[in-house]
Amino acid sequence: MDNKYMLTVEDVSKTYDGFKAITDLTFYLFEGELRTVIGPNGAGKSTFFDLITGRAKPDQGRIEFGFNTDLTQLNEYQINRLGIGRKFQTPSVFSEHTVWNNLVLSLKGARGVFASIFHRLSSTQRDRLDELLKLIRLDGKRDWKARQLAHGEKQWLEIGMLLAQDPKILLVDEPAAGMTDEETHRTGELLLSLAGRHSIVVVEHDMTFVKQISNNGQVTVLHQGSVLCEGRFDYVQSNPKVREVYLGRGKADK
């Protein structure tokens, strides 16, 4: 295996009660790459993330992290500790805690709510959290409770919480869902700024957003649990098969 791959998925299949959610799926993610994954409902996108994070186990195939770490033999907790973080579509934050404390609670090695909040942070940790607050554009709201934030800001906070764990791979599920156009664009800028320092896989439906973050990178199209095609955004957008099974009715032109 090429040791430049952060993630290797080869010939993976997963069936639920006779339904083939994933079929002979092969996918490679390079170190520092930002990859966008699109596909219609039922294409297998959520199952794909479940298999990577250990929430589900494949019936067959190989899933490896970095050089020769077999993820299929590990549980969710072990995979998370390796440095694979997942952000679900609905933001999951500690609503009654401040933005700052949400980040403190997410620090790698955090030891529980009270222990984490009252633990004296090192100057390095404080500097790291200050840096994250600026990165997610919430430095002016560090003392706000998370419930006071707008939807998009909660999404950014959760991304910041993942980053506090110092992940090597970020799996981000439909980050633009429910956002305003401005929030969506800012989210794209944030993800683009993280590429290179982290390997990122983004599942998304908003094609304007996909175009923004693909940034000449690869877009993978899933259909019926397999890769239909991969390539630059313009290639994927104009591919007749993609237009037929996913975009359709001129949506690719929007």
Image (cartoon, rainbow, N blue to C red):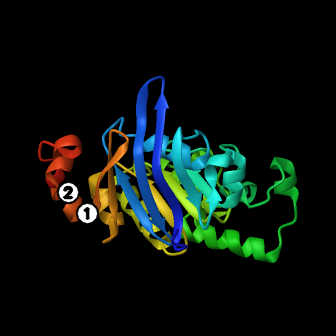
- Residue 99, horizontal then vertical, whole percent: 65, 56
- Residue 129, horizontal then vertical, whole percent: 69, 68
Q: Amino acid at mark 2?
A: Gln
- Residue 123, horizontal then vertical, whole percent: 80, 76
Say whether residue 238 is left or right of residue 155.
left
Q: Amino acid at mark 1?
A: Phe
* Foreground pick, 228 / 190: 228
- Give the total number of marks visible in the rendering: 2
Q: Mark 1 sits on what residue? A: 233
Q: Which mark is residue 56?
A: none
Q: Residue at image x 20%, y 64%? A: 234
Can residue 98 be seen in the rendering of this structure? Answer: no
Q: Residue at image x 87%, y 65%? A: 120
In the picture as drawn, the residue positioned furthest to the top comes out as: 17
Say whether residue 103 is left or right of residue 87.
right
Say whether residue 150 is left or right of residue 114.
left
Q: Tag 1's secondary structure? A: helix
Q: Mark 2 sits on what residue? A: 237
- Residue 177, horizontal then vertical, whole percent: 40, 46
Q: Within the image, what quadrant is residue 225 found in?
A: top left
> Residues under labels 1 and 2: Cα distance?
6 Å
Q: Are marks 1 and 2 in contact (CB under 8 Å)?
A: yes
* Foreground pick, 141 / 172: 172
Q: Within the image, what quadrant is residue 109 found in?
A: bottom right
Q: Residue at image x 55%, y 49%? A: 52
The answer to whether residue 223 is above or below residue 152 is above
The answer to whether residue 62 is above or below residue 213 is above
Q: Residue at image x 36%, y 35%? A: 42
* Foreground pick, 147 / 226: 226
Q: Tag 2's secondary structure? A: helix
Say whether residue 60 is left or right of residue 110.
left
Mark 2 neighbour density, 10 Å: few (under 14) some (14–19) many (20 or more): many
